[in-house]
Image: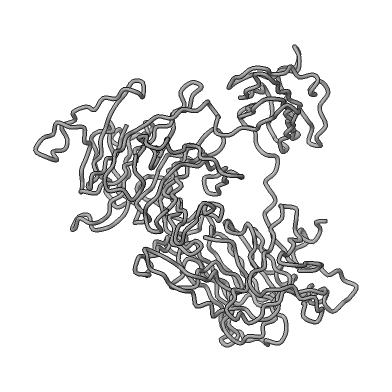
Amino acid sequence: MWYDVWDGDCHNFYATSSDGISWTKPSLGLVEPEGSKDNNLIFRRTRLDHMPQVIHTPWDQDPQRRYKLINFDFGRSPPDHAVTGYWGAFSPDGIHWKDTTRNPVLPDSGDVGHFLWDPHTERYIGYPKVFSAVRGFARRSVAVTFSTDFEHWTPAELVLVPDEWDDRWVTEYKQHTDFYGLTVFPYESQYLGFLWIFRITNGESDGPIFCELVSSRDGINWARSEGDRVPILSLGEAGSWDDGMIQTLNYPLLEHDTIKVFYGGFDQTHGFRRGAAAVGLATLRKDGFVSLEAGSVTGTVTTKPLRNLEGELRLNANARGGEVRVELLDEEGVALSGFGGDDCQPLERDGVSQRISWGPERDLIPASEKPRRLRFLMKNASLYSFMAGGNVSLDSLPIPAEAFFTFESDQGRVAKDQWVCDGVQKGLLHGGVSIDNDPGNSFQGGSALAFQAHGGNLNTLEIEDTSHLGDRFTLAVWVKSSKHALSRLFSTYRGSGEPATGELIFDFNPSSGVLRFILAGQKVQSQPRFWLGDRYHHFAATYARGDVKLYLDGIQVGEGQVRPGNSRLMSDGSLVEYFAPTGTESSVGVHLAANLRLGEDQGGRFIFRGKEVLASNQEQLVGFVDNVLVAKRVLAGNEIGNLVSISNSAKENEDVPVAAGLVSDKFRKQP
């Protein structure tokens, strides 16, 4: 165990154990802090060698690099340690360390970070803290960075921010939720993580920290549990040694049928000045992070179509006092002969690897080139996981998410998403935005969205589930503007200061004839191209792993690149930029601090380190909007051109359906 102790200074120690319970602190004779080397300190560069992360890589061909260490340096010890960031070191034994030739290996992106070797992609991954502007606060959030050699890391890119549900506990002004850290570990075919939830109770930097479970298929796009989000590792009882904060290590230990999680516990909250800390152990059954539960009435759950489903089928399930049966289905959902629920020998025990059989002659799933499904029939049972062969995969990737609003037949404060194959992303009307049913004000059909002069209101259309746009997307909208000044199309910008990490702006200015796309402070803009303001015009922007193209009325009018990285907001309101070199593609894509809004910025107060700033909100879109599209794919230039030309033809021809030609052929052919 490598562990960190803070008493005003940071100290990094080493201990060993044969059972994980009783630990020995060997005298290493390496560091002399107070006149003696009789201690278990492993290294000391400065007073603030913060949060060491050790990765064991025994396959490294260089025996001097079998262990790798990365830790945060605050850059407060010039001249050698004047740059804030993460420092790297190598060791043959995990005890004797030598710094990498290039330090810091990762510039400052926040003083809490967790790093690992990823066997899925055969590279190193780090999850450092970054600050992003989220609903009125500069909040601690989670970014991701990658390296193939441990010494050269990509600039950290935002992947996870607190949502509105995280603030459900708030009762007083300035209280809010931050993410203090994320410890990630590859687990079977996916990634799991313990997300450190920091509830700031005093509006500044005090409050408890506990852990929730998150999951991912690629280490970039993270899913969080629904419902009340019960902590995966909660605080201890009041008065106990870990009732103030909990912080997990960077990897749990799977030992036989038990998962062991070592963690740091504190008897004070984050703003403490004096208190006690210790290392504890929590245990969990193998695969026991979540389960599907069935009560006294038989319940069923069916998988999506799976390929390479073959051989033994084993379940991790607790069916004591109940039962679990399994059906093998074809891709249409019909049970194969001899593999139905009545053929299955029911599981009635508790076990982490129980074999399913459909009779003496049917205990193996036969190989097939066609996809198949599994249906689980459960009663008074819990299902944790299943395994059938080593190469099971989904038959097809999910449909790229798209949101499309025509405002036809919409009423009240919600606009209906007309593209429902991927689920439904509602449009929420805020402020003075309203549905206008005068056909003369719409581009097509009989309705449009009306934006009035704001008069103090923030008039916006918020589009749900658009905070994670990914590495390819298209934003498009028809607008008839009555304002001859800068107007927001899409935005997640807070409305004050320079745009920072997690903030996107797509806007236009009729007076200058310029379209702009801004991401984390990086700007792509068009050449001046003037247009008439008394009729509808089509605006579109596409993003493909950093490459941005801007379109006006179906014609490309600008292009450029936004580089991967982050733009950190400092306490004085300035920005420090950490971006990759020009020409670098983003492997993460765009993760925003909020859902996209159409018509104006987020607005309101913004608070950072006790300072409050009010948004100006002078960029309000005024006029009418129709046919809004947010697609997590890139429409090619000819598609956007056809979209505009066909839409104009449809508008002039009453026999053409209202929705015709608004998107690509693939889009229009869906029912």
Task: Write the residue at 72% across / 25% down.
Answer: 379
Whether residue 125 is visible to the viewer of this picture, yes or no, is yes
Quarter holding the C terminus?
bottom right
Quarter holding the N terminus?
top left
Question: Quick check: 537 left or right of 438?
Answer: left
Whether residue 143 is visible to the viewer of this picture, yes or no, is no
- Front-lying residue, 506 or 604: 604
Find the residue positioned furthest to the right.
655
Q: Position of residue 511 (x, y in %)?
A: 58, 88
- Front-lying residue, 198 or 422: 198
Q: How many marks?
A: 0
Task: Write the residue at 56% across / 67% down.
Answer: 548
Task: Write the residue at 37% across / 50% down.
Answer: 152
The relative height of residue 181 versus residue 455 in the rendered view (above or below) is: above
Task: Write the residue at 87% across / 77% down.
Answer: 653
- Front-lying residue, 524 or 51: 51
The relative height of residue 266 versus residue 401 in the rendered view (above or below) is: above
Q: Position of residue 535 (x, y in %)?
A: 72, 84
Scheme by which the image is coloured = one colour
Location of residue 228 by image quarter: top right
Location of residue 311 by image quarter: top right
Q: Position of residue 51 (x, y in %)?
A: 32, 44
- Front-lying residue, 583 or 223: 223
Find the residue positioned furthest to the top.
360
Q: Position of residue 312 (x, y in %)?
A: 66, 21
The relative height of residue 459 versus residue 165 in the rendered view (above or below) is: below
